Image (cartoon, rainbow, N blue to C red):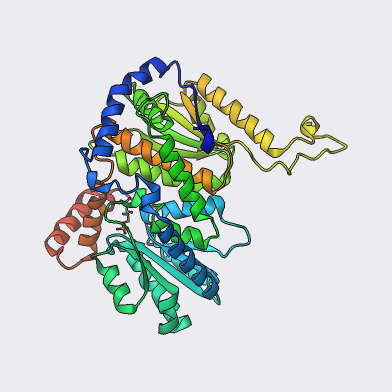
Amino acid sequence: MASIGLKLDAGYLKPAAPQTEILQYQQSITAAHDQLFSGAGLGADFRGWLNPDVLAPKSLLTEIQTTARELQERSDALVVIGIGGSYLGARAVIEALARDDGKPVYFAGHNISADFHSRLMRQLAGKRVAVNVISKSGTTTEPAIAFRIFQELVEKNAGAAEAAKLIVATTDAHKGALLKLATDRGYKRFVVPDDVGGRYSVLSPVGLLPIAYGGVDISALVSGAATCAEACASTDLQKNPAYFYAAARNTLYDKGYNVEVLSHFEPRLHYVAEWWKQLYGESEGKDHKALFPASIDLTADLHSMGQYMQQGRRFLTETFVIVEEGEPELVVPETQENLDGLNYLAGRSLSEVNHEAYRATALAHWEGGVPNSTVLLKRLDARHLGALLYFFERACAVSGYLRRLNPFDQPGVEAYKNHMFALLGKPGFEEKTAEIRRKVESSGVESSIIFG
Ligand code: PA5
């Protein structure tokens, strides 16, 4: 996949997962690929992300860019309201690539914290605020509450007529409360395609509008993903890095490696790891199966979780995401006293030192019993990040099929919602309310011993 600047280095997977064993997945991979492309697999109605050019054609990109520009002109900041797949993709790309001199993008509605939302409102005081509310169902509690708050704020500050130009709703084309509200108020609308689930939606209007507002080149992002899709066309494990990655992580899982840790050395990739965790956690974490996806930020976490990685329980596998070409300008300064003994590094770039830290860590973790592989990105820009996002999506769908799972649904998310609705007394949940309250009072937190 050299042409798109994304490589997979699998050298440290052996002896836990030698290539010969990974290649034994070939037949299953071919079957999973066929299911994915023929529509014979589970959740086949949600494959609209497979072809990035079709998901985000040029006409849509132009419409999104125009809307983003208009919003930028009218506002000082954008608040993106959404949760799960309706915000993590945008946040991942914006935190990784947004220009320092661009207009800020804030995120709300991914929790129900009064403290969080009050602080955000204080931060935005005196600013012209635009809002992009994103919810496919249009009924998710967290963003719906946040939207009430920010809709009120924008209407109070700008007046109802201007508010209608400052608020954009991204939701289902045909149904849902948000669709009705947006239509009634005359908000600009973008569609969450019927055939794309939240966590695969970053390259649809769900992610692209906030990303464009943040000043990132969305055409380059989509084109990087499309190139990656082409590079992942082969069913041959040795020619398709996404499939090799899917087969390798499943080989390790078969051998009792239950946790996959995504590690990176660039703080700007923190939310890419958060997005990755949602993608794999929600896609595969069902039927009591699959690798638990975790992440660490390096080198910071080498001084905390690094101890466990090196010497804790051996059920960990690790995937590094490494950016090959960093900023060359910043170098380690020389000092006359050399009290810290670091003059041997003087004049060398921080990027070079950071890269050696990665190479040292990958070797140390491997020696400590953590099989690891590395996704190498040539540069951290829109094109390469688009390729990376698609690489993980494609691998995730196939990995789910290898485990005979539906990688596109999330039935487990409903359990907490139903209990919460019952506890909050949502109409229609009356019978459940008494039952859930009884359960909480007799068996949960409230019946435990409380000290202090
Ligand atoms: O990946 C998913 O489908 C979920 O994480 C959803 O995106 C999340 O639950 C938010 O749902 P909605 O967009 O309907 O508000």
In the picture shown, does residue 430 fall above or below 21?
A: below
**Image-based side of 9 in relation to 27, left or right:** right
Find ligand 1 in the image and state its quadrant: bottom left
Residue at x-position 28% and y-position 62%? 172
User: In this orientation, which residue lies closer to the viewer: 332 or 217?
Assistant: 217
The image shows residue 41 at horizontal and vertical percentages of 22, 38
Quadrant of res 333: top right
The image shows residue 191 at horizontal and vertical percentages of 33, 62
User: In this orientation, which residue lies closer to the viewer: 278 or 451?
Assistant: 278
User: In this orientation, which residue lies closer to the viewer: 147 or 3?
Assistant: 3
**Image-based side of 122 in relation to 280, left or right:** right
Residue at x-position 22% and y-position 53%? 440
In the picture shown, does residue 98 fall above or below 157?
A: above
Residue at x-position 38% and y-position 34%? 233
**Image-based side of 208 in relation to 24, left or right:** right
The image shows residue 449 at horizontal and vertical percentages of 31, 48
In the picture shown, does residue 181 fall above or below 433?
A: below
Residue that lies at the very extreme toward the left in this rendered image: 431
The image shows residue 112 at horizontal and vertical percentages of 37, 62
User: In this orientation, which residue lies closer to the viewer: 47 or 101?
Assistant: 47
